[in-house]
Image (tube, rainbow, N blue to C red):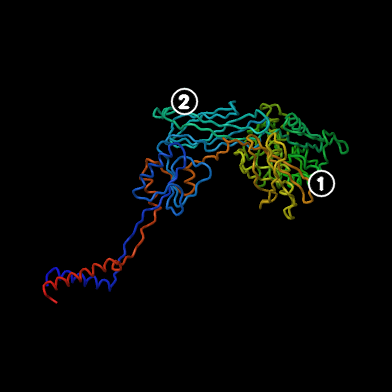
Amino acid sequence: MTLLARALRLIAIVIAVLGVVDPAFTWPRTDRPLVALIDAGGRGASAATDRVARALAANYEVHRGPIAGAESTVLVGTVLPGAPPAVSGAVVAVAPTAAARRVEIIAATAPAVASPAARIPVVVTLRAVGVNGRTLRVDVLDGRVLLDRRTIAVPNDDARLEVTLSAAALQIGLTRLAIRVSDDAADGAAPTAAASAPAASDIASLGGEAVTVTEVADERWPVLVVDARPSWMSTFVRRAIEADRRFVVTSRVNTSTTVAVESGNAPALSNADALTPFAAIVIGAPDALAASDVRALETFARRRGGAVVLLMDRPDTGPFAALTSAAAWRDVRGVERRVLATPAGSLVATELAVPTSLAAGVDVLAAAGNAETPAVWQAPLGAGRVIVNGALDAWRYRVREQNGFARFWTHTIGRAAASAPPAISVEPATRVLAPNASLDVRVTVRAVQLSDPTKPAPTVAVRARAIARGAIGDGELVHLWPTPERGVFAGSLTVGATQGTHRIVADVVSADGAALGSASADVLTGEELGAPASQDLAAWATAQGGVSVTEADAPALERALRAHAAPPTAEQVRPMRSMWWLPVFIAALGGEWWLRRRRGER
C-alpha cells in the first residue's frame, strides 16, 4: 500500500471516528452592534451626520433614522425640534464641529397676565458655547418698538446665562414680545475679556430669536376697607390704594356703635357670603372686631381664597388675635425712628407690636433691623392669607423714604389681591400656536375647588369654545371633563385657521342648567409661531441618561457606544454535523480503494 493510500484510509477513519464522537466546541461570538443615527437639526447637522455615519460604518451596523432594537441611538445636531424622536438603547448626542460656537435661547418667559400700569418682567435663559469673552446684547421688542436692552458678558466656553428684561404694555390685550440675542461687538463694542476671544465674524451662529406672549388685562382689584373704629393707620392706607387705579375701593368707617360712614355699598362684615365679591379686605382697628366678624373673615379667607389685612394701631388683643399666627406680642416703644426696609418700599416707625413667636409658614414682609423683629408679616389661612401690621405708628412718617408708606401698602395689598383666585379661571396650555392646532385647556371653578372637602363637590358642567377676533358666531362648544384635582376641568379644542388672536371662552352651568358664569383667555396663532420650541439637544440627551460628545472627540463617541454594546455571546458548534464531511469521507475511501486496485491489492 502506498503512502497516499494509507493517508486516505487514515483520513476516512478519523472522519468516521469523529462522526461517532460528535465533539462540541465553544468560543465567543461578537456581532456588529446596531446603531440608529438621527439628524436632530441645527447648524451643520446634516453634513456632520454623514461624517459620523462613515466613521461608524467600519465597526457598527448603522441605520439612518429611529429603529426598534438598536443598542444605541446617536443624534447629531444642537437642537431637538418638536416632539423628541423615539429612541432605543443608549442616547448619545453629538455636537457638529460647525456648531462649536453658538448662542441659543433656551427659554423666554413672561407672566401670563399683566397689568397695564405694571412693568412686565421677561426672563431669558441663554446657553453660550465657545464665545468666552464676548458680550451679548439681549433685546425685547413689541413689533419694531424696542422696550428694553441688556448686555451680559460670557464668563466661560460653555455658559448658561439668565437675564431679566423689563417690558411696558403698549396696549390692552395679547402682546407678542420678541426676544433677540446678538453679538454686542457687531455694533463696535470692544470685547470684554481676553484677546483670544473669537472675532464677531467668526461667530456665524451667534444670535437667535424667541417669542413669548403676555395678556395685558385692565383688571382692577375689588377691596373692602372696614374700620371697626376710626383709625389713622387705616385712613392713610385707604387713601394710598384709592389713589392707585388698579384698586376699586369700597369702605365703611364705624364712627360710633350706631353711626358709620360708607363709600360704595359696603356689606356687613359679619355676612360671609356678601364678602365673596372682594379680593381683599382691609381691617382698621382690628382690636374692635366682634367674634362674629372674625369668624366671617376666616370663612372669607378659607372659602373665598381672599386676603385679610389687619392694620393694628395699638397693641391690644381681642378675638382677631386668632387670625394673626402670633402667640402674643410685646409693645416696643422708643424715640428712635426705625426704618423697616423692604423691596417694595420702606416704612418708618417708632412703636412696634412685635410677636413673641410666630407659627410655622409665616412670611415676614418687613422687619426692624433683622428678621428677629418682625413688624409686618403674613400667614396662610386656608386658600387665602392674613397680613398683619405691627408698625403701629408708621402712618406718622408716611412721606419719608420717598413715600415708602404708600408704595409698600399698595404693593403688598395689590399682590395679595392678585393672588386671590377668580370665580372661574381659564388656563391654555400655551399662548402661541399654529392655525388649526389642538389646544389643551384647564378651567378652575373656585366654588367647586374651595367647597367643603368633607362633602361631595358641587356638580357643574364646563364647556369651552374658541372664537377668532372679528368672527361671527360662538364657535364649537367642547365639554371639559373633571380631573383628579378638585374643581379643575380639562379638555382639548381646535382653534380656527384664522391667524391672529383667538379667545378661549369657558362657560360654567349648574346641574339644573343655571348659568354660573364665564371666563376667557386669549391665545395667538400664526404660521411662524406654530413651530414647536427647540430643546437643547445635549441637555435632553443627558436628561435621558445618555451622554453628550463633540464630533471631533471620536474616542469619546467610541467609548459611549462600546459601553452599551451587547457583550460577546458563547456559541457552541459541532463541526462534524456539517454535510460537507460526507463527500470528503466518500472521496477518501474511494481514492484508497482505487489506489489498491490499481496495484492489484485487495
In front of the other: 238 or 327: 238
Element assignment for label 1 = helix
Residue 113 position in % (x across, y down)? 66, 36
Q: Residue furthest right?
A: 258
Q: Are discs 2 and 1 less than 8 Å apart at CB?
A: no
Q: Secondary structure at mark 2?
A: helix
**Image label count:** 2
Examine the image and state in which quarter residue 200 appears. top left
Question: Which residue type carries mark 1?
Answer: Ser
Tell me how far mark 2 sits from mark 1, CA to CA: 67 Å
- Give the side of residue 224 with respect to residue 428, left or right: right
| Residue extending farthest bottom | 602
> Foreground residue, 451 or 253?
451
Q: Residue at x 66, y 31 (%)?
A: 118
Pointer 2 or 1: first along the chain: 2
Disc sitting over residue 292 in the figure: 1
Tell me, for residue 185, which label it has, or none: 2
Question: Farthest top residue?
Answer: 188
Residue 109 lies, in percent from the top left, at 58, 37
Q: Quadrant of the N terminus?
A: bottom left
